[in-house]
Amino acid sequence: MKTPAFARLLSVALLLANAPGPAALAAPAAQPLMSPAADNPAQHPTFRVRVVGQGRPMLLIPGLTCPGAVWDEAVAHYQQQYQCHVVSLAGFGGLAPTAVTDPLLPVVRDQLLAYIKAQQLTRPVVVGHSLGGFLALLLSTAQPEALGPLVIVDSLPFLSAVQNPAATVETAKPMAAGMRQQMRQGKLTAAAQRQMVAGLVTDTARVTQLARWSAASNPATTAQAMYDLFTIDLRPDLGRIQQPVLVLGAWAAYQQYGSTKESTRAVFVQQYAKLPQQRIELSEAGRHFLMYDDTAWFFAQTDAFLKQHAVAKK
């Protein structure tokens, strides 16, 4: 596999990171339905949460530059069985930014864990796309007992190692710092935004929406989050994760660079080698936004996984 090409495209994917889907899973035995506790947004300035539906708790985290609306189809699919806590990160997709710390993602992690505790969510399912998948891993390596099953959508525990398997946090920092500085300087033109997004999703309407979200995102927030993705290595800590994890990956967009499904799978297998309870599945045709490009497959995989690993409700 031409790993530099894979890394370039996946790096771009992580920069961007409403019809209902198929029928939701059949509900398990009758359970009392709970209303969410009163939220205090001041306690978690790095994100906002929209709660939809009732039942077992599910946390949905979007990718870089995307608001929680990226999960609208998933919410429509799951809201009859799950109480969906849809996260939108400050500074992404038009949401006002907050103070940007260095690092940023561990601060988001701690506030998400505090939110889970304040809302009394018992082992919520966590679904994360791209940066959201990285955050799901970050949450679980910190407090594995606090979460239920994880669904990781096209994300890796250490992005720098895709291009250079021998990379370490220290060797990755100079490149990541240069990238952060460049990204802070300003936004891309509308045409450049569309060109970037075009490799991540197939539908032209989705390209337009994703490009708008990217253009509306705060450059300083995006730059710091991207720096964190390249300089935080979660691979050594994956053994701490106690819950089952479904990893859904994309490979079709990398074909033009000489990649195959098998070579792309090898990257995922290598990165997740220390994860105890894992299942890795690759879409045949979907690009980075698998929930858009291969919707039926995405729901079939996720539904079966959640049915197999039913968790305690809130």
Image (cartoon, grey):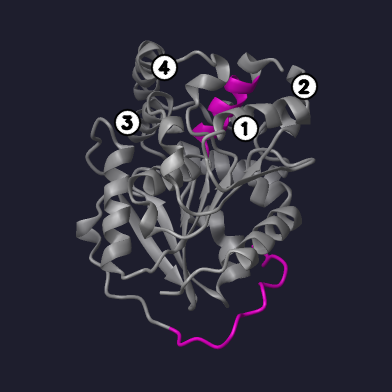
Residues drawn in magenta: 6-33
In the rendered image, residue 301, in percent from the top left (x then y), is placed at 70, 56
- The mark that comes first in sequence, 2 or 4, is 4
Classify mark 4: helix, strand or loop.
loop
Residue that carries the numbered disc 2 in the rendered image:
256
Instruction: Give amino acid for label 3.
Output: Ala
Instruction: Give amino acid for label 4.
Output: Thr
The numbered dot on residue 220 is: 3
Classify mark 3: helix, strand or loop.
helix
The numbered dot on residue 268 is: 1
Q: Mark 2–mark 4 contact, CB under 8 Å?
A: no
Residue that carries the numbered disc 4 in the rendered image:
168
| Picture mark count | 4
Q: Does the image show residue 97?
A: no
The residue at the point 38 percent across, 19 percent down is: 169
Q: Would residue 25 be counted in the magenta stretch?
A: yes
